[in-house]
């Protein structure tokens, strides 16, 4: 290999910024940021009050860190987009525990060095649960995370937020590599966080459904994310209760979740027979509450969580 070729492989492109949202992520952030720095020397972390050493690790690695209180995922993401879009041609958005693999890094670098034919690219997520990579049991694997500045934003939803394209005639494509969602949470924290997300999902589903260009629309013939949202829309037309049982059967048997061993069973169980059933129970609670008691129902979601849901 020539010196020039070696330099191309080792020197990260300079026209992209990687945006990380962080909160008490010290256990995983070094791995996430180290992989991100191979994509770009510019890593911009928006931290919402970490006290566990996350900020110090990022600064040690040479990342830019800004502190900002967390209101919700969409607000934090769109604020970050606005901060970096004037100074960088491309943006790559990751959560604190999403680690890019070798294939993904190489493909993104090639795109940034001049081979990009689209305005945005979807990355494939591989889920982890209880410390094990899930080969079959993972949920909603495609996420639009790499886009030209001005071409993307995060949709304004309470739950299950995705990045969407902005403007007419924008195009996107899929990358081959993975971002490994290593889920550094303990099971207790996972359950607590999903309990909060069930509040948001119940609120989302009990109110008027958003439409138009501000949200990702359900489309049977759309991209992978739009098809998932279309199927989810059908799911919510099924009877409360049995639909969660059907979802467990789909995840564990039809999607071969049983091949992931005990973590695959627990993941399917908690996703369908706990989380989805919990959403249904809260929807029932909201629908049956007395109109004269508007404070009944779900609790106000906890504000300080920078992790996008992994349960859509």
Image (cartoon, grey):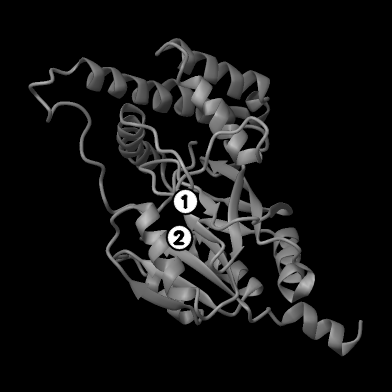
Horizontal side, residue 177 vs residue 181: left or right: right
Q: Secondary structure at mark 1?
A: loop
Q: Position of residue 92 (x, y in %)?
A: 57, 65
Residue furthest to the left in view is 292
The residue located at (66%, 62%) in the rendering is 119
Q: Is residue 48 above or below residue 268?
A: below
Few, some or many residues within 10 Å of mark 2 (<14, 14–19, 20+) = some
Residue furthest to the bottom in view is 3
The residue located at (37%, 37%) in the rendering is 194
Which quadrant of the figure has residue 201? top left
Q: Position of residue 250 (x, y in %)?
A: 60, 20
The residue located at (62%, 76%) in the rendering is 40
Q: Which residue is mark 1?
A: 184
Few, some or many residues within 10 Å of mark 1 (<14, 14–19, 20+) = many
Q: Which residue is mark 2?
A: 27
Badge 2 or badge 1: first in the primary sequence: 2
Kindly indicate whether the residue at mark 1 contacts the one at mark 2 (C-beta within 8 angstroms): yes
Q: What numbered label is drawn on residue 129?
A: none
Residue 26 seen anywhere in this rendered image of the structure? no
Horizontal side, residue 233 vs residue 295: left or right: right
Q: Is residue 251 above or below residue 89?
A: above
Q: Secondary structure at mark 2?
A: loop
Q: Give the spatial CA distance, label 2 vs label 1.
A: 7 Å
Q: So how many labels did they put on this image?
A: 2
Q: Nearer the viewer, residue 234 or 167?
A: 167
Q: Nearer the viewer, residue 80 or 164?
A: 164
Q: Position of residue 121 (x, y in %)?
A: 66, 56
Horizontal side, residue 103 vs residue 182: left or right: right
Q: Position of residue 240 (x, y in %)?
A: 40, 13
């Amino acid at each position: 290999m020539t010196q020039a070729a070696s330099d191309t492989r080792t020197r990260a492109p300079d026209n992209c910024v990687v945006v990380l949202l962080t909160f008490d992520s010290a256990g995983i952030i070094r791995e996430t940021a180290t992989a991100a720095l191979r994509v770009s020397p510019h890593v911009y972390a928006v931290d919402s009050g970490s006290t566990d050493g996350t900020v110090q690790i990022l600064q040690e690695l040479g990342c830019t860190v800004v502190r900002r209180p967390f209101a919700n995922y969409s607000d934090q993401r769109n604020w970050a987009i606005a901060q970096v879009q004037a100074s960088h041609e491309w943006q790559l958005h990751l959560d604190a525990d999403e680690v890019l693999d070798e294939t993904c890094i190489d493909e993104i670098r090639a795109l940034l060095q001049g081979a990009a034919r689209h305005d945005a690219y979807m990355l494939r997520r591989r889920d982890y649960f209880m410390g094990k990579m899930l080969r079959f049991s993972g949920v909603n694997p495609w996420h639009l995370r790499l886009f030209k500045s001005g071409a993307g934003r995060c949709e304004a939803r309470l739950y299950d937020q995705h990045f969407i394209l902005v403007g007419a005639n924008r195009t996107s494509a899929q990358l081959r590599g993975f971002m490994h969602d290593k889920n550094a949470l303990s099971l207790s924290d996972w359950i607590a966080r999903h309990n909060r997300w069930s509040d948001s999902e119940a609120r989302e589903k009990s109110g008027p459904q958003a439409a138009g260009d501000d949200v990702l629309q359900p489309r049977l013939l759309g991209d992978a994310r739009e098809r998932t949202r279309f199927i989810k829309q059908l799911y919510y037309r099924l009877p409360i209760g049995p639909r969660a049982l059907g979802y467990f059967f789909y995840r564990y048997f039809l999607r071969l979740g049983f091949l992931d061993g005990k973590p695959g069973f627990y993941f399917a169980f908690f996703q369908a027979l706990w989380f989805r059933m919990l959403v249904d129970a809260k929807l029932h609670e909201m629908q049956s509450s007395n109109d004269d008691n508007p404070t009944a129902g779900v609790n106000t979601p906890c504000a300080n969580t920078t992790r996008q849901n992994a349960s859509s």
